[in-house]
Amino acid sequence: MSPGDIFILAVGWILTIAAVAWVGGSLFYLFVLRPASRKGSDASSSSAIANEFRALVGTAVMVLIITGVVLAFDRLTSKYTDVSYVSVLGIKVGLSLWMFWLAGVLQKRRRSRANASLTEEERSSLPLTGRAQRVFSSANLIAIIGIIVFLLSDLLQALFEDALKAV
């Protein structure tokens, strides 16, 4: 294994850790932190956790962008990369950018309306479109898109490995 191969392996590993931290953190937020804060847990501790998570997301986004550019450049300059790989990579990059944008929107929204959550009674009286809007809220979409991006990463790996086998 050459030093270049070791570098690319390390960059891929760092990218994966950053993605796991962000997507895993998003799932923790959706399924643990948000329900706990709705049940009336300590507001100051929830705020402290949210601030720490924001810092994690900011770091993860920077790491994802830097390592993603390095890996994309490595794969796109390879003679084994074909049109299907480039197409899937384009979809993955587009979804990732959408995720980054949603994270920024979510952060701005949280700052602008602190503690403005609906009660259970208000939530149950929402029309169907209101319920659908809550299902596809920024936080939920970030987790859903993150899971899809992980799937596309595995697909890209499989496409690249298949191209190597064909040689």
Image (cartoon, helix red, strand yellow):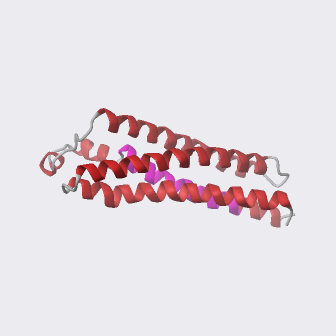
Q: Residue at x 51, y 57 (%)?
A: 21
The secondary structure making up most of the magenta span is helix
In the current view of this chain or complex, which residue is farthest to the left? 121
Residue 31 is situated, as x and y percent measured from the top left of the image, at 34, 60
- In the image, residue 111 above or below residue 120: above
- In the image, residue 55 above or below residue 18: above
Is 135 situated left or right of 89 in this image? Answer: left
In the current view of this chain or complex, which residue is farthest to the top? 112
Q: In the rendered image, which quarter is residue 107 located in? A: top left
Q: Is residue 151 magenta?
A: yes
Residue 149 is situated, as x and y percent measured from the top left of the image, at 56, 53
Quadrant of the image containing the C terminus: bottom right
Residue 37 is situated, as x and y percent measured from the top left of the image, at 25, 54
Q: Residue at x 61, y 48 (%)?
A: 63
Residue 92 is situated, as x and y percent measured from the top left of the image, at 60, 48
Q: Which residues are magenta?
A: 137-158
Q: In the rendered image, which quarter is residue 69 located in? A: top right
Quadrant of the image containing the N terminus: bottom right
Is 43 situated left or right of 62 in this image? Answer: left
Q: Residue at x 52, y 55 (%)?
A: 148
In the image, 119 versus 54, the foreground residue is 54
Whether residue 49 is visible to the viewer of this picture, yes or no, is yes
Query: How many numbered discs sit on the rendered protein?
Result: 0
Q: Residue at x 76, y 64 (%)?
A: 162
Q: Is residue 114 magenta?
A: no
Whether residue 82 is visible to the viewer of this picture, yes or no, is no
Is 128 situated left or right of 76 in this image? Answer: left
